[in-house]
């Protein structure tokens, strides 16, 4: 089932959680976000990686809901196998990362975060099906 058909099915099954009409498109964003780049950086567009036919089919199935972009920026796509065997789509942003100005306030160290959990008794795990598109 394509992404669009699947989305329509969900909307039909649960109509009470979806708006009947969307007012004021595009929606107002509470936070404006921009990636700061090193001065003088021009747009980066990397050619797609070669992919086996099976990979191309999986890519088409996962990107069924995406719209074409005509921006001068582009990054190649590849797949990584999940623990249970399914494939996760990954985008190679290494070239963009090289020209990105790093955040002055880095994330906390993982060992410090684990120390905060030492007295916890309940833990949960979430593996979003397509995490990148759910951010």
Image: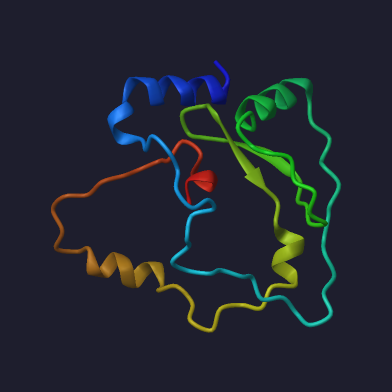
Rendered image quadrant of residue 78: top right
Q: From the viewer's perspective, is 115 left or right of 92?
A: left
Rendered image quadrant of residue 102: bottom right
The residue located at (82%, 74%) in the rendering is: 41
Which quadrant is the N terminus positioned in? top right
Is residue 24 placed above or below 78 in the rendered structure? below
Q: Nearer the viewer, residue 123 or 118?
A: 123
Is residue 33 placed above or below 58 in the rendered structure? below
The residue located at (54%, 47%) in the rendering is: 132
Q: From the viewer's perspective, is 50 left or right of 25?
A: right
The residue located at (15%, 58%) in the rendering is: 120
Q: From the viewer's perspective, is 3 left or right of 73?
A: left
View extreme (top): residue: 1
Is residue 130 placed above or below 64 in the rendered structure? below
For the image, the number of numbered tags is 0
**Residue 106: percent from the left, percent from the top?**
49, 77
Q: Nearer the viewer, residue 13 or 103?
A: 13
**Residue 48: percent from the left, percent from the top?**
82, 42
Q: Nearer the viewer, residue 120 or 91?
A: 91
**Residue 80: percent from the left, percent from the top?**
61, 38
**Residue 128: percent from the left, percent from the top?**
43, 40
The residue located at (48%, 55%) in the rendering is: 27
């Amino acid at each position: 089932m394509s992404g669009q058909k699947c989305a329509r099915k969900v909307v039909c099954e649960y109509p009470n959680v979806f708006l009947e009409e969307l007012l004021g498109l595009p929606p107002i964003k509470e936070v404006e976000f921009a990636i700061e780049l090193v001065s003088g950086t021009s747009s980066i567009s990397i050619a797609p990686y070669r992919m086996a036919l099976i990979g191309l089919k999986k890519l088409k199935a996962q990107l069924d809901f995406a719209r074409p972009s005509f921006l001068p920026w582009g990054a190649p796509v590849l797949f990584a196998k999940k623990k249970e065997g399914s494939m996760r789509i990954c985008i190679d942003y290494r070239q963009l990362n090289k020209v990105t100005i790093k955040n002055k306030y880095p994330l906390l160290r993982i060992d410090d975060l684990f120390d905060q959990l030492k007295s916890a008794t309940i833990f949960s795990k979430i593996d979003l099906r397509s995490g990148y598109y759910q951010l």
